């Protein structure tokens, strides 16, 4: 994955891994980005929920980059909805697997999305 132009990581990057799952939280110019790779299921969703909750402490907009997610269960969807209930309206960068679940759940209009991380950062920067 190539870094977007103008992206600056501030401070320490947090990451957690379990089998085919990883989640990383980092500060990017004007936003907090949570990047998720692998399968989000009942086993990995608690770690994702924990990382999203930790990322919502700041005043920066939240972008959840799910473009590397290969499987997305309803437990992952619950994580996204919980983050919305915590006062954040995360901006998503979904993979095809995530987009399908959002569409089937009729949540397309409730969670803003972009095709790429660079696009999401540009949209929230407006």
Image: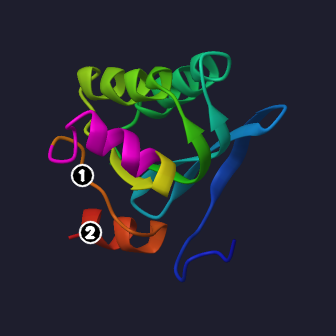
**87 and 98: which one is in front?**
98
Q: On the picture, is 32 further left or further right than 44?
A: left
Q: Which mark is residue 123?
A: 2
**58 and 76: which one is in front?**
76
For the record, the magenta segment spans 98-109
Q: Secondary structure at mark 2?
A: helix
Magenta stretch holds residue 31? no
**89 and 9: which one is in front?**
89
Q: Sort mark 1 into few (<14), some (14-19) or many (20+) by Cα contacts within 10 Å.
A: some
How far separated are the C-alphas under marks 1 and 2? 10 Å
Residue 64, image x, y percentages: 46, 47
Instruction: Determine the residue positioned at 40% across, 36% down.
Output: 58
Residue 89, image x, y percentages: 25, 39
Name the image quarter holding the C terminus: bottom left
Q: What residue is pinned by disc 1?
A: 112
- The image shows residue 93, relative to residue 6, as above or below, that is above
Q: Residue furthest left?
A: 109
Residue 10, image x, y percentages: 62, 56
Residue 96, image x, y percentages: 47, 56
Q: On the picture, is 26 further left or further right than 114?
A: right
Any part of residue 38 in sight: yes
Q: Secondary structure at mark 1?
A: loop
Instruction: Determine the residue positioned at 27% across, 33% down.
Output: 105
Which image quarter: residue 87? Answer: top left
- The image shows residue 105, relative to residue 10, as above or below, that is above
Q: Residue furthest right?
A: 19
Q: In the rendered structure, are the residues bearing label 1 and label 2 in contact, judged by CB atoms less than 8 Å apart?
A: yes
Instruction: Determine the residue positioned at 45% across, 46% down.
Output: 98
N-term-proximal mark, 1 vs 2: 1
Q: Which mark is residue 96?
A: none
Q: Residue furthest bottom?
A: 5
């Amino acid at each position: 994955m190539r870094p977007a132009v103008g992206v600056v990581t501030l401070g320490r990057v947090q990451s957690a891994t379990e089998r085919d799952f990883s989640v990383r939280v980092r500060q990017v110019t004007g936003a907090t980005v949570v990047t998720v790779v692998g399968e989000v299921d009942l086993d990995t969703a608690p770690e994702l929920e924990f990382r999203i909750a930790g990322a919502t402490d700041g005043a920066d907009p939240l972008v959840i980059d799910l473009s590397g997610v290969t499987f997305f269960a309803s437990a992952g969807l619950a994580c996204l909805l919980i983050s919305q209930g915590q006062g954040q309206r995360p901006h998503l960068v979904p993979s095809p697997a995530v987009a399908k679940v959002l569409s089937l759940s009729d949540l397309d209009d409730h969670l803003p999305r972009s095709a790429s991380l660079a696009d999401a950062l540009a949209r929230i920067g407006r």
